[in-house]
Image: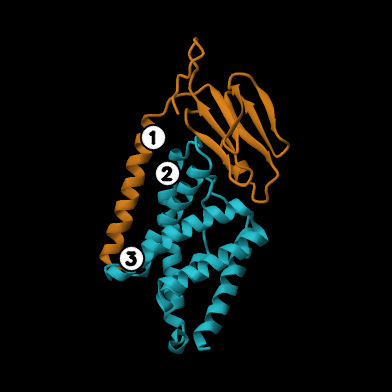
Chain colours: A orange, B cyan
């Protein structure tokens, strides 16, 4: 292993740490989970109501104690089921094979206009 | 037909078997797109034996075969994006002569993940993928490091005549 290899690894780890800390500091609590399938919105559900959402029979998301978690997927690898429960704004659970995405978003304001853009 | 075609066939078969073995291991970091990428050992070894073009060909054949056998169309797209970016960066770093196999492989691991993330971002907009960026970088460094060490051991032991 050369010195340049170590510098390269160090720079990459440093970028990861800085971006990780920034993302952690900038995170906001979210209160709804928005589910999309293939880029199309499937539905949005408040995190403060416990429920189980069946997504076209391919995936099931459970909302419990203010967190959302994927509890069923019919894809072979089931990686999305290993992802931890999400509750902070912009955290997501992604099932790549079924193109199912669940993203936490912040509060919608009382006027019904998106409080979180993008 | 030189020895190269024979070795290329053996390497491709090896990469495919390794992909299969990896698909069997229930092993996950809890972040989408992150896995050990054992098949990259074969790709890195091919890069050092024959250069970027052959390594790319091997990688594409491996992804198509394992994608159709064990994955699906979308798994193929993510893998191809990762492999293209990863191999381009690895070939450039190798050419620069400033890095050893380990450094080249670390960059390859990181850029494989970045390539996959970019493909996922295009196919699934609004997925909040930025959140995974730090994990993907760290995972790329770790897996790239391990793959680099293993590849170096393999490259050392390959017979000289296999390059032709």
Q: Which numbered tag is attached to residue B152?
A: none
Question: Residue at (42%, 60%) from the top-left corner?
Answer: B86
Q: Which residue is mark 1?
A: A23
Q: Chain of mark 2?
A: B
- Tell me if residue B42 comes above or below residue B33 in the rendering: below
Q: Which residue is mark 2?
A: B133
Q: Chain of mark 1?
A: A
For this orientation, the residue located farthest to the right is A57
Q: Are marks 1 and 3 on the same chain?
A: no
| Callout 3–callout 2 Cβ contact below 8 Å | no
For marks 1 and 2, give the CA distance. Answer: 10 Å
For marks 3 and 2, give the CA distance. Answer: 23 Å
A58 or B17, which lies in front?
A: A58
Q: Chain of mark 3?
A: B
**Residue B48 placed where, x, y %?**
40, 75
**Residue B106 placed where, x, y %?**
39, 60
Q: Which residue is mark 3?
A: B92
For marks 1 and 3, give the CA distance. Answer: 31 Å
Say if residue B51 shows up in the picture. yes
Tell me which numbered mark, 3 or 2, is placed earlier along the sequence: 3
- Tell me if residue B96 comes above or below residue B86 in the rendering: below
Question: Residue at (53%, 78%) from the top-left corner?
Answer: B8
Nearer mark to the viewer, of 1 and 3: 3
């Amino acid at each position: 292993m050369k010195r340049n290899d170590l510098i390269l690894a160090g720079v990459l780890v440093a970028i990861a740490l800085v971006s990780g800390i920034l993302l952690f500091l900038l995170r906001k609590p979210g209160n709804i989970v928005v589910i999309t399938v293939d880029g199309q919105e499937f539905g949005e559900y408040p995190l403060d109501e416990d429920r189980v959402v069946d997504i076209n029979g391919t995936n099931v998301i459970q909302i419990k104690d203010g967190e959302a978690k994927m509890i069923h997927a019919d894809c072979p690898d089931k990686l999305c089921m290993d992802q931890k429960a999400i509750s902070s704004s912009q955290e997501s659970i992604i099932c790549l094979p079924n193109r199912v995405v669940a993203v936490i978003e912040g509060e919608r304001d009382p006027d019904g206009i998106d409080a979180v853009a993008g | 037909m030189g020895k190269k075609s024979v070795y290329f066939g053996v390497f491709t078969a090896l990469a495919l078997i390794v992909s299969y073995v990896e698909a069997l291991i229930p092993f996950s970091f809890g972040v989408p797109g992150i896995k050990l990428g054992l098949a990259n050992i074969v790709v890195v070894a091919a890069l050092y034996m024959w250069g970027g073009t052959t390594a790319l060909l091997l990688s594409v054949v491996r992804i198509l075969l394992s994608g159709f056998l064990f994955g699906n169309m979308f798994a193929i797209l993510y893998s191809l994006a990762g492999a293209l970016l990863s191999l381009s960066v690895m070939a450039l770093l190798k050419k620069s002569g400033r890095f050893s196999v380990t450094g080249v492989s670390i960059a390859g691991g990181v850029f494989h993940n970045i390539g996959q993330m970019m493909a996922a971002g295009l196919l699934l907009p609004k997925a909040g993928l930025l959140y995974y960026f730090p994990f993907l970088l760290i995972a790329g460094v770790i897996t790239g490091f391990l793959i680099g060490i293993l590849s170096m051991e393999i490259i050392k032991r390959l017979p000289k005549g296999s390059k032709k």
